[in-house]
Amino acid sequence: KTRPSAFFICLKHSVYRRVLRFLLFSPLRLLLCCMNTGLAQAPEQDCMNAIPLCQHTYTQTNAYSGTGAVPDEINGSTYCMETGERNDVWYTFTVQAGGNLHFQIIPLDPGDDYDWAVYNLTWNFCDDIALDPDVEISCNYSASTGNTGATGGSMLFSAGPFDPSFNDVIPVTAGETYVVNVSNYSSTQSGYTIDFSQSTAVILAVIVIPLSFSWSPESMMRSWLISAWLSLKVLDCFN
């Protein structure tokens, strides 16, 4: 009888951790992925628990409150978001096909001020966001209320309080992993819709289901191994 440890031993250490997280936590992440209701101090308010993108549009009917269990994930002294995190939530995706990332945040109350930032975690971890300014790819901290996002509305990739609400679209490449932070500067209870549907890049998370359902322990283990390896590229968002 095959021992479970044999499955892990055959993987490199770094991949082992990612596969383990995939097998143990993907059901929870998929549940979060399909939930639209904002919760105070929810797990997805920390980068490591970012919501994987499994649909183009999310509507948060209730705004998030607080900054999660991990404080100061965004360093306001080195990034364009001068106040750091503020009633925020994190989303994540791994690019499946290159193109432009295009998204828009539409507050349910047009008088609300939402800020956002996009970080490249392809070769970095969540902890690096506060330490390495180069991890930030695009950010908008405009003081204007209403819609905001990366739509091509300007040529900016870093917008301060007096800049426009819209940045340029973000070119992304297949295999890259990103996180998007959405912060509610207004601290209201009104939520928002975030819409990625105009992206030319393919960014939605996909679950690869094992094709073999043989009852042989050996073939079942092989099937799960292949499935896990194929899923790593699209489920890096579960790191």
Image: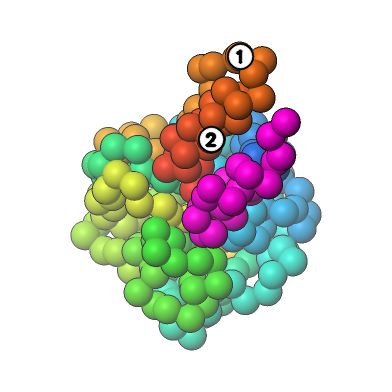
Q: Position of residue 128 (x, y in %)?
A: 49, 74
Please report the bounds of the magenta region as a residue range. 1-21
List the single residue furthest toward the right: 40
List the single residue furthest toward the left: 155
- State which quarter of the image contains the N terminus: top right
* Residue ID at (43%, 61%): 121
List the single residue furthest toward the top: 214
Rendered image: mark on residue 214: 1
Q: Is residue 77 above or below residue 12?
A: below
* Residue ID at (76%, 48%): 39
Disc 1 or 2, which lies upstream in sequence? Answer: 1
Q: Which residue is mark 2?
A: 225
Of the pair 30 and 24, the residue shown nearer to us:
24
Of the pair 178 and 190, the residue shown nearer to us:
178
Q: How is the image coloured?
A: rainbow
Give left or right: position of 73 versus 129.
right
Q: Are marks 1 and 2 in contact (CB under 8 Å)?
A: no
What secondary structure is marked by label 2?
Answer: helix
Q: Amino acid at mark 2?
A: Leu
The answer to whether residue 19 shows anywhere in this view is: yes
